[in-house]
Amino acid sequence: MESKRGRIRRVNYWKATLGILALLSASLVLAEDFKTVSGKIYKDATVSRVEADGIVLRTKTGISKVYFVELPKDVQERFRYGSAMPTVPPGKAVTRRIDAAESARPAATQFVDAADRFAQRVEKTLGERESILQGKHTPSPAETMILREFAFHKAFLAGIAIVAIVLFAVVWARVK
């Protein structure tokens, strides 16, 4: 005879399994194919964001920006291209929100967005390290203080090592 606790535990496992399967399949349901006017096809793409001049698509092969002028009229109308678009200063991308039905995203999409933010942070850190290696980085006052402190500790440890070697040599000479 099975206990009530065992049945509840089994039900919870099934709920968790079904939840995970729903999240994994949600990204496939939201994916669609986009075809440009030149004939290029983006298979199983999800719209990452809508910008003033185009849409950013996420596919299995990566992230691509497709400009509205490259898309058919029906896709342009779907993303409201040309209707009260904000003016864009040179070099700045103005993003706008998709309407409430399209902006309600499942947890899987939020996970992908979090992964993108992490990748951007890693890219920024690697860029900073590369500039340091190339000598293009000017350290901040805090970094300068830390570097001085490291230099002091290195010198201090080197001095202690020299004193220890001299003491060892003196003791060794007397023991012999």
Image (cartoon, rainbow, N blue to C red):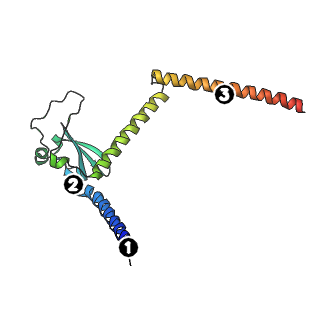
Of labels 1 and 3, earlier in sequence is 1
Q: Position of residue 48 (x, y in %)?
A: 25, 45
At a point 37% along the width and 42% down the height, the residue shown is 118
Mark 3–mark 2 CB contact (< 8 Å): no
> Relative to the observer, which residue lies in front, 65 or 13?
13
Residue 157 - label: 3
Q: In which quadrant of the rendered image does the N terminus lie?
A: bottom left
Residue mark closest to the camera, 3 vs 2: 3
At a point 32% along the width and 60% down the height, the residue shown is 20
Quadrant hosting residue 157: top right
**20, above or below 74, in the image:** below
Q: Residues within 10 Å of mark 3 (few under 14, many from 20)?
A: few
Residue furthest out toward the bottom = 1
Side (left or right) of 103 relative to 137: left
At a point 29% along the width and 52% down the height, the residue shown is 108
**Label 1 secondary element:** loop
Q: Residues within 10 Å of mark 1 (few under 14, many from 20)?
A: few
Q: Mark 2 belongs to which amino acid? A: Glu
**121, above or below 41, in the image:** above
- Residue linked to disc 1: 3
Residue furthest out toward the left = 83
Q: Position of residue 130 (x, y in %)?
A: 45, 32
- Residue linked to disc 2: 32
Residue mark closest to the camera, 2 vs 1: 1
Q: Mark 3 belongs to which amino acid? A: Leu
Distance from label 3 to label 2 (Cα)?
A: 62 Å
> Relative to the observer, which residue lies in front, 73 or 98?
98
**Label 3 secondary element:** helix
Distance from label 1 to label 3 (Cα)?
A: 65 Å
Q: Mark 1 belongs to which amino acid? A: Ser
